[in-house]
Amino acid sequence: MRVYHYSDMPDQPIAGDAPGTRKRPLNDVDSAVSTAMVEVAPGGHTLRHSHPYEHKIFIVEGMGEARDDSGNIPLAPGVFLYIRPEELHVISNNGAKPLRFLEIEPTQKKA
């Protein structure tokens, strides 16, 4: 068993058009599931993107919205998102404090 505080893991800015967004990978061992804590500063957002795999997001703190092709979904602590493979999405912070969420997805193995 490995136990550590998420803030002990190094964070990194998200490259591209994702102002105010940082990602803190939480995996430090080989695993089939990748987890990360993502923080979006007030007024910031993630990339508008999709993945070839499903993934999940659990809102830990802050306020914001998720946008997909069908519209906007309000985000608040406790909200859980299931994002289908190839579904375009973006997460935005429209609150006054950082928006933090746990991202869970399959580990992408490097060739």
Image (tube, rainbow, N blue to C red):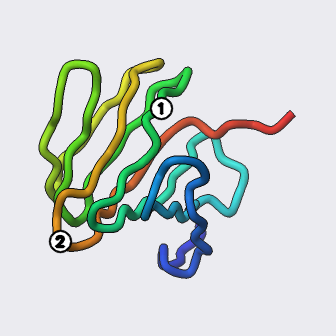
Q: Position of residue 16 (x, y in %)?
A: 58, 48
In the visual, does 89 lie left or right of 30? left
Q: Residue at x 54, y 74 (%)?
A: 3
Q: Residue at x 47, y 32 (%)?
A: 49
Q: Amino acid at mark 1?
A: His
Is 51 in front, or is 42? 42
Mark 2 to mark 1: distance in Å? 24 Å
Q: Residue at x 56, y 81 (%)?
A: 8
Marks 2 and 1 in Cβ contact (< 8 Å): no
Q: Which residue is mark 2?
A: 96
**What numbered label is drawn on residue 63?**
none
Q: Secondary structure at mark 2?
A: loop
Is 93 in front, or is 24? 93
When asked about the image quadrant of residue 93, the answer is: bottom left
Within-10-Å neighbours for mark 1: few <14, some 14–19, many 20+: few
Q: Residue at x 36, y 52 (%)?
A: 45
Q: Earlier in the sequence, mark 2 or mark 1?
A: 1
Would you place residue 63 above or below residue 3 in this image? Answer: above
Q: Quadrant of the N terminus?
A: bottom right
Q: Quadrant of the C terminus?
A: top right
In the visual, does 108 lie left or right of 26? right
Q: Position of residue 107 (x, y in %)?
A: 63, 40
Q: Which residue is mark 1?
A: 49
Q: Position of residue 101 (x, y in %)?
A: 34, 57
Would you place residue 20 above or below residue 107 in this image? Answer: below
Q: Position of residue 38 (x, y in %)?
A: 43, 59
Within-10-Å neighbours for mark 2: few <14, some 14–19, many 20+: few
Q: Secondary structure at mark 1?
A: loop
Q: Which residue is the extreme one toward the right?
A: 111
Q: Amino acid at mark 2?
A: Ala
